[in-house]
Amino acid sequence: MKKNRWLDTLEQFRNDEQPECVLLVSGSPSLIRIVVAWMNMPIERRKRLTPFPQDAGQQWEWLWRNAVYSTERLATYMPSSDKELEQKLQALIANKVLYPDGTVNGYVERFLQARIVKTLSSAGHWLRKAG
């Protein structure tokens, strides 16, 4: 387990996902944009991990301390400039919407996929009427 402690710890959080975090992003286009941008971000794990905390409450923070990403680069993935990017990013992290490997909470991902299907379906219906 020691060699894969980071991945194993991340997997424990994935197994404990809660659907309520969908409520955080569902009504916020700016948070949705951050989530979508996050899924396209290059993110790496540190080669030398910091000491692993035995306290389960600190393990989420430990995962993030050992993730390497650029908030400046994340800002370039956004369709518009957002001065509150760092604050919103931290809220998404604290609520376990974003994962430190570049993925997102499974419930949020399914919500976004359903929203895309609905949008595309509506667009197709509109295009058929217009044609």
Image (cartoon, rainbow, N blue to C red):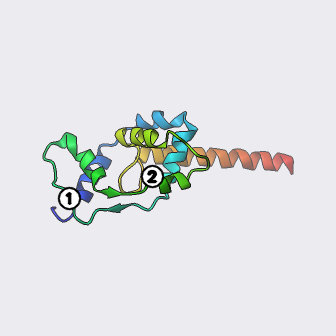
Q: Gap between marks 1 and 2, in whole Å?
A: 25 Å
User: Foreground residue, 40 or 115?
Assistant: 40
The reply, left or right, for residue 19 in relation to residue 40 is left
Amino acid type, label 2: Thr
Q: Residue at x 57, y 39 (%)?
A: 29
- Residue 87: % across, % down: 43, 38
Identify the image quadrant of residue 114: top right
Mark 2 — residue? 71
Q: Secondary structure at mark 2?
A: helix
- Residue 46: % across, % down: 28, 62
Q: Is residue 104 above or below residue 27?
A: below
Amino acid type, label 1: Arg
Q: Earlier in the sequence, mark 1 or mark 2?
A: 1
Q: Residue at x 24, y 58 (%)?
A: 6
- Residue 27: % across, % down: 55, 33
Q: Are marks 1 and 2 in contact (CB under 8 Å)?
A: no
Identify the image quadrant of residue 21: top left
Mark 1 — residue? 5
| Callout 2 crowding tier (Cα within 10 Å): few <14, some 14–19, many ≥20 | some
Q: Is residue 65 above or below residue 26?
A: below
Q: Is residue 29 above or below residue 8?
A: above
